[in-house]
Amino acid sequence: MKKVVLAYSGGLDTSCAIKWLKDYGYEVIAFIADVGQGEDFAQVEKRALKTGAKKVYVGDLKKEFISDFILPALAANAAYEGKYLLATALTRPLIAKHLVEVAHREKAAAVAHGCTGKGNDQVRFEVTTRILDPKLEIIAPVREWEFRSREEEIDYAKTHGIPLNVSKKKIYSIDKNLWGISIECGILEDPYAEPPKDVYQMSVAPQDAPSKPTYLTIDFEKGVPSMINGKRYGLMELIARLNDIAGKNGVGRADMVENRLVGIKSREIYEAPAGTCLYTAHRELEALVLDRELLHFKEMLGLKYAELVYYGLWYSELKSALDAFIKMTQKNVTGTVRLKLYKGNCIPVGRRSPRSLYRKELATYTGKDKFNQKLAEGFIRLWGLPFEK
């Protein structure tokens, strides 16, 4: 009997996939990735075994997720189409990497995932797998099986006694980790419909947030966040703390129609309270310490970086080359940014750095001004000379 290692989340698709793969003659080994989704993994493991998995691996990937995936994306200010902070996209190459490692350990001939044929995750899992081990067979049950809807999957699961964490009334597809959450399906498939209140899980509605703003400071050391309000935290605790503070202020929501890699448009709901604060603060600090040409060029590369992550090309040579450049840009990104959180808004209100390029004596309009305004006329003449007819 051929072994297959399944990336198992415990959700509807992967739960049905265990039974489906067994029926096709595979011995199923489930791999559960702990990327900070906060689930009871003992229960998820039991669910996998009850559904038919022969063996279950649970990998604690949280530290690796932060150090090797979140921090590089933050340094790049990578946000797909200006809104999506890539919480789900960043986990896929990490999970695929460990999926391949488990397959090697178990001498499995194949790996499998529960991704839909019209989504992005299938690309991220499969491209990463083929880069790391092109000899492994890849099985995608959702692309092959007979079910045409999530409702039919639910009926199948009930027929075969597969434990579920969804229902036909609450049919959202949810992917959560310590960096954020992605939500789709159900009423969200109507791009004109306002998301119901129960969709959101990490933040309160802005109108229900406190009537007084919350102020906080975030410190960075060479681009890496290190302190909140002057108190040093480990990165995992720092992210959790920001998720709590910002979430209580309704910060971090995104409702967007995005362009999927496969060519269709999709309506997605995202929450990333900590990510929103850190991206905002990081960009503000870079504006203070990076020179104009470096800052503008880096902004262009950030767009490409986000595309590479979204497209599943984490292990590509271009991504590695961009990482080397972006790492260099962070050497002076040290300082403090003050944020004001108020009813869904994350507003930078102050920034300072020992590496600041801001010079008050040049920017001021007071009597302390040291800027030689007489030089401006010659500068303008030379600057515009190529365009004179």
Image (spheres, rainbow, N blue to C red):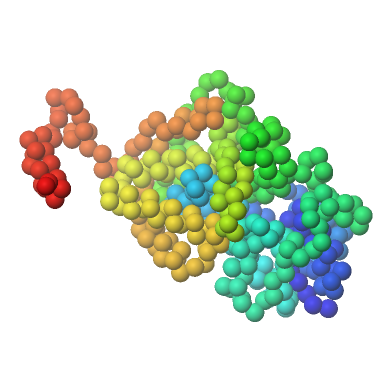
Q: Is residue 206 left or right of residue 3?
A: left
Residue 218 percent across, percent down from the top left? 45, 39
Give the camera-side residue of 122 and 48.
122
Q: Quadrant of residue 99?
A: bottom right
Does 160 sit left or right of 352 as displayed? Answer: right
Q: Nearer the viewer, residue 12 or 387?
A: 387
Residue at image x 67%, y 49%?
A: 175
Which residue is at 42% across, 33% downward? 348
Q: Position of residue 322 (x, y in %)?
A: 41, 61
Does residue 44 appear anywhere in the picture? no
Quarter-of-image position of residue 160? bottom right
Above-or-below relation of 30 to 271: below
Q: Is 233 situated left or right of 31 in this image? A: left
Front-most of 219 and 88?
88
Q: Where is residue 371 in the image (x, y as percent from the top left)?
A: 13, 35
Res. 172 visible in picture: yes
